[in-house]
Amino acid sequence: MAAGSWIMWHKLQLITNVAQFMPQAKTPAEKLLLEELHQGNAARIILIAIQGNDLKAITDASKHLAARLRQQRIFARVDNGEYSLPEVEKTPLFRYRYVLSPNITAERFSVQSLHEIFQQRLLDLTSPFAFFNKQLLTQDPTNETGALLESLLSQDKTHSQYGVWVSPDHQRALLLAQTQAQGYDVQAQETAIGAIRSAFAQYPQQDQTLRLQLSGPAVFASNAKNQIQQEVTTLSVLASVAVMLILWLAYRSLALVAINAIPLLSAMVIASAVLTVIFGPIHGITLAFGITVIGVAIDYPIHLFSHLSGERSVSEEFKTIWPTMRLGVITTIAGYSAMTATHFSGLAQLGLFAIIGLLSAAVVTRWVLPALLPRHYTPVATKVIPGRFKRFLNPGRNAAVLALLPGIIAVVIIGLKSGSLWENDLSALSPIPKQQLALDRQLRAELGAPDASHLVLVSAPSAEAALQQSEALVPWLNRLKKQGAISDFDAASRYLPSQQRQHQRQQQLPDSAQLENAIQQALQGLPFKAAQFQPFVHAVAGAKTLSPVTPEDLHGSALGSKVQSLLLQRNNRWSALILLYGVSDAEAITASAPQQSDVLYLNFKATTNQLIKEFRGETLTRMQWAALAILLVLGLGIRQGGRLLAALLPVMLAITVTVALLLIMGQSLSVFNLVALLLVFGIGIDYGLFFSRQEPDVRMRQRTLHALSVCALSTVSVFAILSLSAVPVLQDIGITVWLGVLLSFVFALLLSQPSAAHNTVKENAVKENTTK
Amino acid sequence: MNTVSKTATLRRAICLTLLCLMAWGNPWTTPWTIANAHAAPQSLQQLMAALAEVQSVQTTFSETKTMALLSEPLQSTGKLVYRAPDFLEKRVVSPQPSYYIVNGNDVTVGSAQHKERHLVLFQFPALEAFIAALRGTLAGDLKTLKEYYDIGFESQADQWTLQLVPTNDEMQLYVKAIRIHGSGDKIRQIDTLESNDDRSTMIIHHSDSSSAQ
C-alpha cells in the first residue's frame, strides 16, 4: 500500500554530495530533480530487508521489527505490507467515501440503481466471507469504500506471504521505514538506522540465520560518511608515512621532512579560511578535491632542497630555480582560474581553492622556507649528487621518438573507444560502492516500483489548482493507457479529488428524505429491512454538508501518505506528480502531451543525461579556456617555441595515455577523473618546465633530476595508496593521478631536454673545472 | 414435605425443558462439556487422525442464513471441494453462481458480477481464522485449530460435534462460535453463530449420505 510513498527513488542513488557538483538547475524538470535529491520524501525512506531461508521466520521477524519500530517516534511510518480490513472503518477512506469515490453521481442513488445494488448485495450475502462485510453493508451499501480500497490496493504490486511483503524468491521480507527527520539531517538519519539495527538485534532469533540489510539514500550517506572518515584516516596516515619515508631517504634529515610539509599545510589553512569567508560553510567534497589539487605544493620545497649545493646561500640558490617554479605556479593558476568563471558552483569553489592554495604555497616556499634554513645549508645526502643517474639525462633523439609512439597509440585507442569515453550514467558518479547500489536496485524492483525514470509533473500555485490540473489530464492518460504507451498511471487526484470535484459530488448526493424514499422503493420485492439502512442515510446526509477534504485531513493514514508522496509543496508552489507504469512508448507521450507550461512530461533518464552532458560540456569549455590561458602565460614566460613544446608536450602525452589506459581498463571518464587530470596537469607542467630549462651545468641538471624523482616518487606513492580505497571516487582519483604523474615524469625525462648544443658546451666546461 | 417434593419436581421439569430447549432449540447456549469420556467411543485425537486420512472430498451443500438484516432466511446451494492439505473451493450454484477458492495462502473470489479478485489470506486475520476452522477440521490438523480456537468435542457412537470458539480478537469481532457436526470421517453440517447473533447452517450432502442431519 505504501508503494507510492517511495516514488522516484531510483534517481536518489546519488547522494547530495554529488548533486552539489551538478550544474544549477535551469528548467523546472531539473529543479524538481535536484530538489528531490536533496530533500524529497524519498530521501527520508529506509529500505529494510530481512534475509533468511525460512519464509515463516523472515515474515515473523518482519512483523516483530515493524511493531517495534512503529513504537518509536523517530519514524513517521513503517510499512511491511500488514494491514487489516476492520481498520477500514476508522480510515478517512471510509469517512470521506461519498466525496472521494469516483462513482458518485445523482444516478447512483436513483431507485433503479439502488434496486440493482441491493439485489447484488443480497447475492453477496451468500458468500462464505459475508460476515466480514455485513456491518459495512448497512453503512455503505453502494460499496464506495470497497471501490476506493480496490483502487488503492491495485497500486500495491508487492509480493506478499504470511501477510507481509517478501521478495518473489521468498528469501527476504521487505519493509519501508520513513523517518520524521529530513533526509539531509545525517545525524537524525544515523539515529534512525541505529534504532533499526538495535531493534533487529533484540529480536530473539532461534538459530541466528536471519540477516538485516538496509538501503536507501540515508543509509548510503551514513555508510559513505563512515567509510570515507575511516579510510581517510587510514589512508592519510599511510600516505604521510610513505612521503616522510621517501623524503627522509632522499635528504636524511628529519628537519627537512617537517619543513617540507609547511607550504602544503599553510596552503590548506589559508585556502579553507578564504573560501569560508567568501562562501560560508564549504562542502566536504570541495575541501577534499581542493586538497588533492593543491597536492602539487608538496613539490615546491623539494625543488629547493635538491638544488641546495652549499656553494651559495640558500636564498641565492633559490633564485636559480625560482623563475621556473614561478612560471609553473602561474601557469597552473591560469589554468584553474578558467574554472572559477563557471556557473557550476562546485567547480568554481574548487578552482578558487586551488588558486589561493597554490599561491600561498608558493609564497611560503619562496619567502618563509629559506628563513627557516641555515644560510649555507645543504642536506647531507645531497651535498654531492651521485653521478650514476646521469645517463638518464641524455636519453637521445631515438628515445624521444620512441616516447611519441605511446601517444600516437593512445590517440588511436581514444578514437576507437570514443563511444564510451564519457560516463553518462548518473549512478556511476555516485561514491557508493557497486554492491550497495546493486542491492538497492534489487530491493526496489522487489517492492514493485513504478517506472522511476518517467513522470508527469503538474505545477500550480495551490494544492487545489494542482489537483484540478491533474484531473484535467486523466482523459489524456487514459488514452495513453488505451494505446498501450503506458500500462497504468497513478496521481494524487485519484485519492484526493480537487475541492471543486468534491463539491460537484456533494451536489449530486440526495437529501435524507429523497434517499429514504428511494431506499423504500428500491427494496420492493427484496427481503432487506429498510430500517436497517439508517446508517447509510445518515452517512450520505453527513457527506452532503461536509467541508471539503484537504491533504491535512488525510494525515497519518495510508491514503494520506499516498497523497503526500504525490503532491509536494516547495516554496509556495505545489507540484502534483503523476507516476507512469510500464512506459513502452516515450515518444507517444511526448508527442501527445498537452502544450501547457505547467504540465511537463519528464523523462528522468534523458534529463539526468542532459544534466551530465551539460556539466561535462561546461567543464570541457572551461578546460579549453584554461588551455588558452596556459599557452598565453607559458608563451609570455618562455618566448621560445621549442621550449614551449618541450614543456607542454610531456604532460599532454601523459594525459592522453592516461585516458587511453583508463578506457582500456573499462572506465569511462567522470567528473572525478577530470578533476584528477587537472592535478596531473599542474604537476606535469612543472616536470616539463624543470626538465627543459637551461641549466648552468650538468650537476644542476642532476639536481633537477633528483628533485623531480623525489617529487614523482612521493606523488605516485600517495595516490597509489589512495587508489586502494573502496570508495569509488577516491579510487578514480587515485588511479588517474598516479598513472598521469608517472607518465608525465617519464615523458618529461625523455622529451624535455634543453637544446643539445648549449648543454654540451656547459658539460665540457664542467669537465674542465673538475680537472683543475 | 409434599409441597416441597412437588416444587422440586416442577423445578426439575422446568430445568429439563430448558435444557432441552437449550440443546435443541438453541444449540449455542448449551453448556459445553469437553470430551465426555463415557459417551465417546472415539477421542478428539482419533477423530483428527481419521479426518487426516481423507485426501479429497467432493460434495454438494445447501445453506441457510438467518440475519437481522433480512426479513426471511437466505438460501443457497452449491458444491464443495477439498483436497488435502490446503485446497478448498466453495462454488455457489444458486441463487447466482460465484466461487471462493483458497489454495495455500491465496484466496480467489469471483462471480458473474464481480471480476475475479485475489487476496492473500494472512492479510485478513479474521478470514484466516475462519478458513483455519474449515481447513483445519478437514485436514485433521488439531494444531492449527488450537492456534485459533478453544476446542470443544462431543461424540456419541459414530456421531461427533466440534465446537470452535475463537480466541483471537479479530475473529471474535465477527464470530462467536462455529459448530461442526459429522459422522465417521465426514463433515455433515457446519453452524456458524456470528457476533451479532446472525446464524448460518450449512448442510453437506455426501453422495453416500445416510445420516445427514
Image (cartoon, coloured by chain):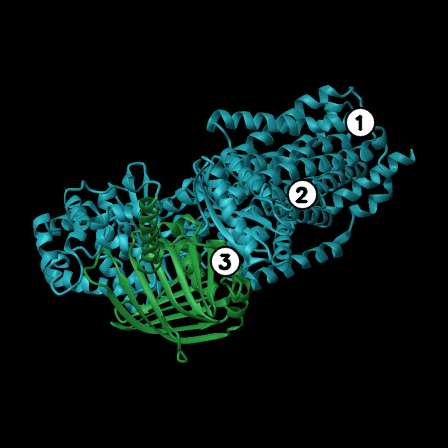
Question: Considering depth in this image, is A354 or B28 the residue closer to the camera?
Answer: B28
The reply to whether discs 2 and 1 touch (Cβ–Cβ < 8 Å) is no
Q: Which chain is cyan?
A: A
Disc 1, SS: helix
Q: Residues within 10 Å of mark 2 (few under 14, many from 20)?
A: many
Q: Position of residue B42 (x, y in %)?
A: 53, 66
Q: Is residue A419 visible?
A: no
Label 3 chain ID = B
Q: Residues within 10 Å of mark 1 (few under 14, many from 20)?
A: some
Residue that label 2 marks: A722
Q: Position of residue B67 (x, y in %)?
A: 25, 58
Disc 3, SS: loop
Residue that label 3 marks: B35
Residue type at numbered disc 2: Leu
Distance, label 2 to label 1, CA atoms, is: 25 Å
Residue type at numbered disc 3: Ala
Q: Position of residue A750 (x, y in %)?
A: 73, 50
Please say if A56 is above or below A367: below
- Disc number for residue A254: 1
> Do marks 2 and 1 both belong to one polypeptide chain?
yes
Of badges 2 and 1, the one in the foreground is 2
The residue sitting at the bottom extreme is B208
Label 1 chain ID = A
Question: Considering depth in this image, is A74 or A133 the residue closer to the camera?
Answer: A133
Please say if A492 is above or below A332: below
Q: Residues within 10 Å of mark 3 (few under 14, many from 20)?
A: some
Question: Considering depth in this image, is A709 or B7 the residue closer to the camera?
Answer: B7
Distance, label 1 to label 3, CA atoms, is: 94 Å
Residue type at numbered disc 1: Leu
Q: Is residue A767 visible?
A: yes
Label 2 chain ID = A
